[in-house]
Amino acid sequence: MAGRLVLVGIPSSNSNNYSSIFLLAYLESMIPAPPREKRLYTRYPFEAHAEIIASDVEWPLRVTNISFGGCRLLTNGLIPLGMTITIRIRTQTDSFMATAKVMHSTADDVGVMFDEIRPESLPVLQKWIDAAKSAHAS
């Protein structure tokens, strides 16, 4: 794993010769770590209108994917990483609202992780994800 320091004892006639040990530790640290999936939930393609509400300012956005843990939004500007926001997502028939944390941000898109989902929004999210799963499986 990258960055992991492993010291291995090597028999040596000179007990002050640690160069071999540190060489092995250095080589071990150069092995790349396996990629990790940061998300707990699968995201599915999903199209809807959204607004981010932060500091009494609203930004209209578009949702491009969704999961139980968060969603991806298309933006036209950077939203600071780590910022806590309120997100409202709407389709023609349903509305969802939650607080979320910005986990990814570029000039074109934002990835948010849902924090507190309003109780009345949970069935809406379930409905959307079920529909997205079905469409994705087809």
Image: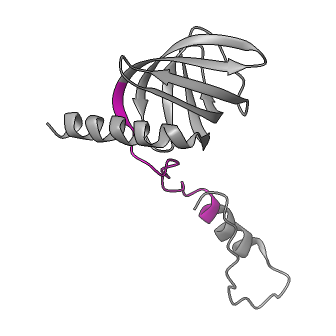
Q: Quadrant of residue 64?
A: top left
Above or below, 37 against 99 in this view is below
Above or below, 19 against 62 in this view is below
| Rendered-image quadrant of the N terminus | bottom right
- Residue 99: horizontal and vertical position, in percent? 65, 34
- Residue 7: horizontal and vertical position, in percent? 70, 76
| Rendered-image quadrant of the C terminus | top left
Q: Nearer the viewer, residue 133 or 75?
A: 133
Residue at the spot 23% in from the left edge and 36% down from the top edge: 136
Magenta residues? 27-46
Residue at the spot 18% in from the left edge and 40% down from the top edge: 137
Residue at the spot 67% in from the left edge and 73% down from the top edge: 6
| Residue farthest toward the right in the current orientation of the protein | 16
- Residue 130: horizontal and vertical position, in percent? 29, 41
Residue at the spot 63% in from the left edge and 35% down from the top edge: 100
Instruction: Answer whether residue 40 is magenta in the image.
Output: yes
